[in-house]
Amino acid sequence: MTGDEVDAIVEQWRRERPGMRPEPMAVFGRIYRLARLVGDGQEKVYAGWGIGRGEFDVLAALRRSGSPYTLAPKALAASLMLTSGGMTGRLDRLERAGLVRRSPDPADRRALRVTLTDTGRRVVEESAEAGLAVQRRILDALPPADQDRLADLLRALLAAAEAGPADPAQ
């Protein structure tokens, strides 16, 4: 296998700082670059439906919730790790586009419910398939067994990262 830009960066650090141990850059540099490239590809695909990644995430959360595709704004914000202000902006854009509808919560008139419209459901289902095609095109460079192994390895790394602070000073 031939080297890439990440290999060149790691090698430069090895040369310039022999005791540094830059090996983690070989993994995380590739993860960062891959995430950026795939994310940019998905963003371009979603633009065909007039939405960005943030709006897609809201529509997808509603669609994944199951029929009747309705959630409280607070539940949406929590699932997407957004502030209430960030969620409000997304919901405003999606409602103007006719993709979601906000209505009073029948159980608590002080609260709201966000519901995916029929158009929103079509948009999220079609754009999700197109976004997966972007991911699939790249992932298909690996045989299925390697894809499964990579998912397992990344799951373990994510669990380790979530288990404690990433900052070694903490």
Image: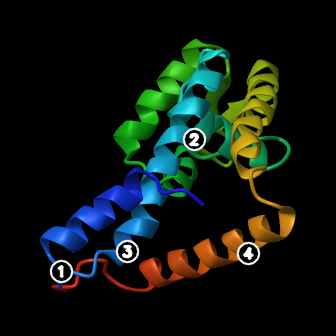
Between residue 6 and residue 151, name the one nearer to us: 6
Query: Could you tell me if the residues under marks 2 and 4 are in contact, i.e. CB atoms within 8 Å?
Result: no
Q: Amino acid at mark 4?
A: Arg
Circle on res. 1? none
| Residue 113 visible, this angle | no
Residues 64 and 155: in front is 155
- Mark 4 or mark 3: whose residue is earlier in sequence: 3
Q: Secondary structure at mark 3?
A: helix
Picture coordinates of residue 81, whole percent (x, y): 45, 55
Residue 151 picture location, percent across and down: 69, 69
Amino acid under disc 3: Pro
Labelled disc at residue 149: 4
**Contact, mark 4 vs mark 3 (Cβ under 8 Å):** no
Check disc 1 and report its element: helix, strand or loop.
loop
Alpha carbon separation for disc pair 4 and 1: 32 Å
Earlier in the chain: of badge 2 and badge 4, it is 2
- In this rendering, is residue 24 above or below 139? below
Answer few, some or many: residues within 10 Å of disc 2's Cα (few below 14, many 20 plus, some between 14 and 19). some
**Residue at image mark 3:** 24
Q: x, y (%) of residue 91?
A: 52, 29
Q: CA distance from mark 1 to mark 2?
A: 33 Å
Q: Residue 38 has which mark?
A: 2
